[in-house]
Image: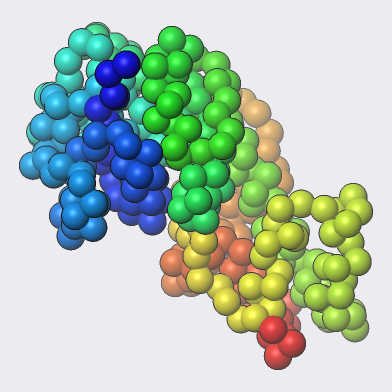
Amino acid sequence: MQMIKAGYIGLGKMGHPMAANILKAGFPLTVWNRTPEKAQDLIQAGAAWAESAAEVAASVDVIFTNVSDTPDVMEVVFGLHGVAEGAHPGLIFVDHSTIKPSASREIARRLGDLGVACLDAPVSGGDIGAINGTLTIMVGGEESALEQVRPVLAAEGKTITLVGGPGSGQIAKAANQIMVAAQMVAEAELMIFAQAAGADPSRVVAAIRGGAAQCWTLDVKPQRLLAGNRQPGFKASLQAKDLNIVLETARETHVAVPGTAIAAQLFNAMVALGAGELDNSAVIGVIEMLSGQSLDTAQG
């Protein structure tokens, strides 16, 4: 069987290790990034460098994008020397970015006119999942296209779920971010509440995370916070961006998301306070400010 030729655009905190795992799995890989220096170790490991997104698209069977926001994806795909310029019938476009579902549908329609199959495939699992190749991948698009690229996706993640047609992967990711934000805010509140009320927050977490409150956030984040570590992980600025996508989509669909609206305000405040580069669990800093109480990190 002929090996799938892959291309990757966007070598940031998530994209770089994901591209590295594709290369490690033995797939021929061509890369492009706005900051070429981020590709140097991949090139040394065997990846080819292209001079533009269009050049990547023209030379591969499947092209992956992983950039920050909807305007960035649209520019990479339809801008000067973008993916669309190098598109060819049979190419499969896979977008790992988190963007508006409506934008993913537009991309699928416009690239579809060029003979390109599109999958919106945002991920969850953070930088650790990207490094370890254990991401959860939520996919929108045609099943036939997914099956063609599944071997490459398997190098990036352990759970690959076809949610539905174009845009459905982004809907699933938005739903994921509703839950993630709620957990981060609840964790922050319960730890500051416990401390202010006179209990050790680390022991409170130990007491409750084996019961109905159990969740990934309580399993992973409290010890980092108690040790004074608020570095990302997943940046709070990206969490804020994702929640704003949820709110925009909720307005378009006339759905009430009051809890998410509050969470969005807290994360937007965090960004406004200059803390957007910290981990999303560092939203506890906003709760600290509102409560006049700082988490005791001495025990960490």
Q: Is residue 297 visible?
A: yes
> In this image, 15 relative to 161: left or right?
left
Classify 286 as above or below 174.
below
Q: Nearer the viewer, residue 25 or 19?
A: 25
User: How is this picture coloured?
Assistant: rainbow
x, y percentage for residue 230? 56, 73
Vertical arrangement, residue 235 with respect to residue 43, above or below: below
Q: Quadrant of residue 118?
A: top left
* Foreground residue among 8 and 215: 8
* Position of the N terminus by quadrant: top left
Horizontal arrangement in the rendering, residue 33 relative to residue 211 (left or right): left
Asked if residue 112 lies left or right of residue 54, the reply is right
Residue 179 placement (x, y as % from top left): 68, 44
Q: Position of residue 154 (x, y in %)?
A: 47, 32
Q: Residue at x 16, y 33 (%)?
A: 56
Residue at 13 percent across and 44 percent down: it is: 49
**Residue 159 locus on image (x, y percent):** 58, 33
Q: Quadrant of the image for the C terminus?
A: bottom right
Residue 148 in the image: above or below residue 216: above
Q: Quadrant of residue 58?
A: top left
